[in-house]
């Protein structure tokens, strides 16, 4: 009999931010296919003898191609049993979920999606600020800082991203942020707009760097660490700076 796939969000890293439903799916799973950022202590919840398969993709490192990961997921599901596909944060946010769902649908494989705590809300919680504000930030936008080639996406909605009244969260931002910031300044976003680089959010080595957009762009031109990071900017809160 064909198996059943649960796409499960593992949250941003803190094992206590794993949902109860995520834990119960991990306990039942016969196989867990996990990303780099979903490894480590989360896997302690898997039952003894479950197959634990690393399928991680991290910028700048050799990693399995997406179609290989989708194929592997289909093969495991065809083998029967309960399969967990563990993805960091929320599985539906910049997690290549669509490709994997398409592959399952093509083979009539049943699945469910268990949401997780996204690193975006974990970052504002860590900074002790809200993501929205009643009067000054009525809009939140999540955007990826790179396309499939690793460069800044060409089709960015620059006027929307230059809106100082929105809170913008840039995922995978570090390599392309100086170029993004330059485009946003040209479009009218003030260089002194408050910004924050949040690295390793909710992990023991969490680091929050508060600066202006221009200051952050300069820092990232000088050096970039390997740590997973997000950049938030816009109508954050005066407290950020
Ligand atoms: C492939 S995306 C997955 C995002 C994930 N689905 C989410 O909702 O957080 C990976 C990117 O998410 C961000 N990210 C994930 N975990 C993070 C963490 N603990 N701290 C900072 N950024 C994180 C980084 O921008 C990282 O490069």
Image (tube, rainbow, N blue to C red):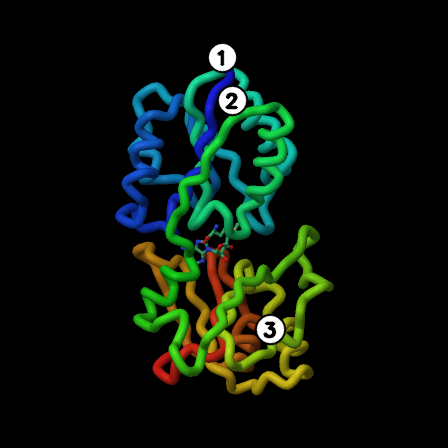
The label shown at residue 53 is none
Instruction: Name the residue at 42% across, 77% down.
Output: 236
Does the closest atom of ligand 1 sit within 8 Å of the Cβ of label 2? no
Q: Position of residue 16 (x, y in %)?
A: 26, 48
Q: Is residue 153 left or right of residue 175?
A: right
Residue at 61% from the left image edge and 74% from the top image edge? 160
Mark 1 sits on what residue? Answer: 1
Going from N to C along the chain, the mark reached first, 2 or 3, is 2
| Residue pictured at 28% horizontal, 40% vertical | 20
Query: Which secondary structure lies at badge 3?
Result: helix
Spatial separation of the CA atoms under disc 1 and disc 3: 48 Å
Quadrant of residue 47 within the rendered picture: top left
User: Is label 1 in a helix, a strand or a loop?
Assistant: loop
Which of the 4 image quadrants contains residue 176?
A: bottom right
**Residue 74: image x %, image y %?**
57, 25
In front: label 1 or label 3? 1
> Is 239 located above or below residue 27 in the figure?
below
Q: Are marks 1 and 2 in contact (CB under 8 Å)?
A: no
- Classify mark 2: residues with Cα within 10 Å, few (<14), some (14-19) or many (20+): many
Res 77 label: 2
Mark 1 or 2, nearer chain start: 1
The residue that label 3 is drawn on is 161
Q: Which percent across, then down, holds residue 21? A: 32, 38
Q: Is residue 84 above or below residue 205?
A: above
Q: Earlier in the sequence, mark 1 or mark 3?
A: 1
- Badge 3: few (under 14), some or many (20 or more) residues near its Cα, within 10 Å? many
The span from disc 2 to disc 3 (Cα, nearest Å) is 40 Å
| Position above or below: 217 against 228 | below
């Amino acid at each position: 009999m064909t198996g059943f796939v649960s796409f499960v969000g593992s949250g941003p890293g803190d094992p206590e931010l794993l949902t109860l439903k995520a834990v119960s799916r991990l306990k039942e799973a016969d196989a867990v296919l996990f990303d780099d950022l979903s490894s480590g202590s989360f896997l302690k919840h898997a039952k003894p003898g479950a197959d634990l398969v690393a399928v991680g993709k991290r910028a700048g490192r050799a990693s399995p191609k997406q179609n290989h990961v989708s194929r592997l997921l289909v093969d495991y599901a065809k083998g029967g049993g309960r399969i967990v596909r563990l993805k960091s944060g929320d599985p539906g946010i910049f997690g290549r979920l669509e490709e994997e769902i398409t592959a399952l649908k093509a083979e009539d494989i049943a699945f469910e999606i268990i949401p997780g705590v996204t690193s975006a809300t974990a970052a504002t919680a860590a900074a002790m600020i809200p993501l929205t504000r009643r009067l000054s930030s009525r809009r939140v936008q999540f955007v990826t800082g790179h396309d499939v080639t690793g460069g800044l996406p060409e089709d960015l909605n620059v006027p929307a991203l230059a809106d100082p009244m929105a809170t913008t969260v840039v995922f995978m931002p570090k390599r392309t942020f100086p170029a993004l910031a330059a485009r946003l300044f040209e479009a009218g976003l003030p260089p002194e707009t408050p910004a924050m680089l949040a690295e390793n959010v909710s992990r023991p080595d969490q680091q929050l760097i508060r600066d202006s957009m221009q200051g952050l762009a300069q820092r990232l031109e000088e050096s970039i660490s390997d740590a997973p990071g997000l950049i938030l900017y816009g109508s954050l809160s005066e407290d950020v700076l």
